[in-house]
Image (cartoon, grey):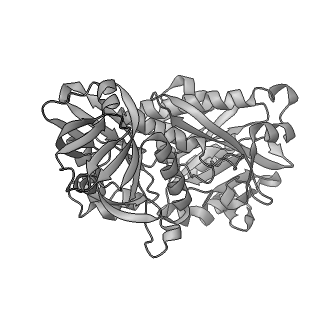
Amino acid sequence: MSKLKIPVHTVHSGILQENAIMLGDKYVRKLRIPVHGPLQLAFGSFRQDVTVIPVPKSDNLRVSEGLARRAGWDSRNLLNMSYVPGTRTIRLGPLIGVLVSREYPDHPDRLFGPITLFCRELTNACHAQGAFVCFFTPEALETSGSGIVGWIYEGGWKRRKLPVPDVINNRVTSRKAENKPSVQQFLAEVKSRYGTHFFNEKFLDKTEVFEALRQDPALQRYLPESHALSGFPLIKRMCAHYPVVFLKPVRGSLGKGILRISREEGGSYRLQTTTPLGTRTISYPSLAKLFRAVAPKMRTTRYQIQQGLSLIEVGRRPVDFRALVQKNGTGKWGVTSIVARTAGNNHFVSNLARGGSLSTVKEAVSKSNLPAGTRDNATLQLTKASLAIARGIEAYIPAHFGELGIDLAMDQSGRVWLLEVNSKPSKNDNTPLNADQKIRPSVKQMIQYCRYLANL
């Protein structure tokens, strides 16, 4: 099946009927499109029976205003086009949908809150690659029937009725919104009715990830001892084995709610908690008293208990790494970026929301207390681990993922460890350090994967 990119223009409906399209004859020849008999024009779930009128020396596809309106187009677009002989279908697109958490129509400069600039960037990248992108919220699915009511950017944000996309990327950051019956019903229906591809379709929780990856002997080397917290006996056993343990909310993010427990001389225990202003430290004469102090948290929040690690440090501040791993234009996992994150002063977590700072892997490693002989292959080891973990997630968790944020640590012997996996990686945390680029590699890669899924 041949593919090419073509300008799509609209003409007045009085000149061209909705069941006819005008196409440059060089495209007709190149794609071997028959000009006799009816064909089908497809864009997302939109279908229209058409006949093709070849136009000499034309370098575009022309459709009527009425057809363009029903497809959700403006007057001009640049779209990929292919012809499928078996079904006599001319396909345009792909139409990519991004499911976002919320919209703020009264604030067009921040229509989608903190990810608005990402949405603009994705729109620009789609224009360059011949794709069409729209953005919609879970609320748009409840009344839209066979299509969606979403937003496109064309000189400004415009609300539009659109077909069901070929591919949907789930950027919803609320588990409650993601699990709404209307959302789950819509997704199940479009997958079965239209063959829509939906990726990053669910949140991951920490315990689920570690239990899944533990099934693969080759991945166990990256896994610190980790368990769903069941009560005091487990804390007691873990603290007997390790000088430091962490309690992490199973569904937490941005370093919120993490507890660090460490043994002190004389049998006492130190509890450190994260706050926006720094680390709060309290000492307890026994582990039992420490547990009684934190037990109320366990009634409302599920925790994972994890072996503490001796992370490499820069200036006595711990360093970890965030790898963005994405599917590429051939459907294979690749590492798009790895950045080092150094904890802020008075913090034991490295998240940017807790005062952490970004640097390149090479810069962080060169300034760290990692032995000189193990520094040169740090990036290679992190890359190898990231790819192995992404493949493990795909193999052992029954869901479709197209990108993963994988948090890794390196201990002072150079061994790589997994901290957690995020199926909704922040577009801010993964900004490459050469911020002058207008369209980030991560955005280009996402579109390449969408095009692979849609075969356009």
Instruction: Kindly give the residue lying farthest to the left in the view shown.
Output: 37
Residue in the image at 12% along x and 32% along y: 37
Left or right, 217 with respect to 281, comes to: left
Q: Nearer the viewer, residue 46 or 228?
A: 46
Residue in the image at 47% along x and 47% along y: 127
Left or right, 80 with respect to 423, comes to: left
Res. 333 visible in picture:
yes
In the displayed structure, 151 sits above or below 129; it is below
Res. 181 visible in picture:
no
- The quadrant in which residue 197 appears is top left
Q: Nearer the viewer, residue 439 or 226?
A: 439
Q: Nearer the viewer, residue 186 or 232?
A: 186
Left or right, 33 with respect to 454, comes to: left
Quadrant location of the N terminus in the rendered image: top left
- The quadrant in which residue 117 appears is bottom right
Q: Position of residue 304 (x, y in %)?
A: 55, 49
Residue in the image at 52% along x and 33% along y: 390
In the displayed structure, 72 sits above or below 240; it is below
Q: How many marks?
A: 0
Q: Position of residue 264 (x, y in %)?
A: 79, 53
Instruction: Kindly give the residue lying farthest to the bottom in the view shown.
Output: 106
Left or right, 352 with respect to 252, comes to: right
Q: Position of residue 456 (x, y in %)?
A: 37, 34
Residue in the image at 72% along x and 46% along y: 434
Q: Position of residue 152 (x, y in %)?
A: 41, 58
In the displayed structure, 211 sits above or below 188; it is above
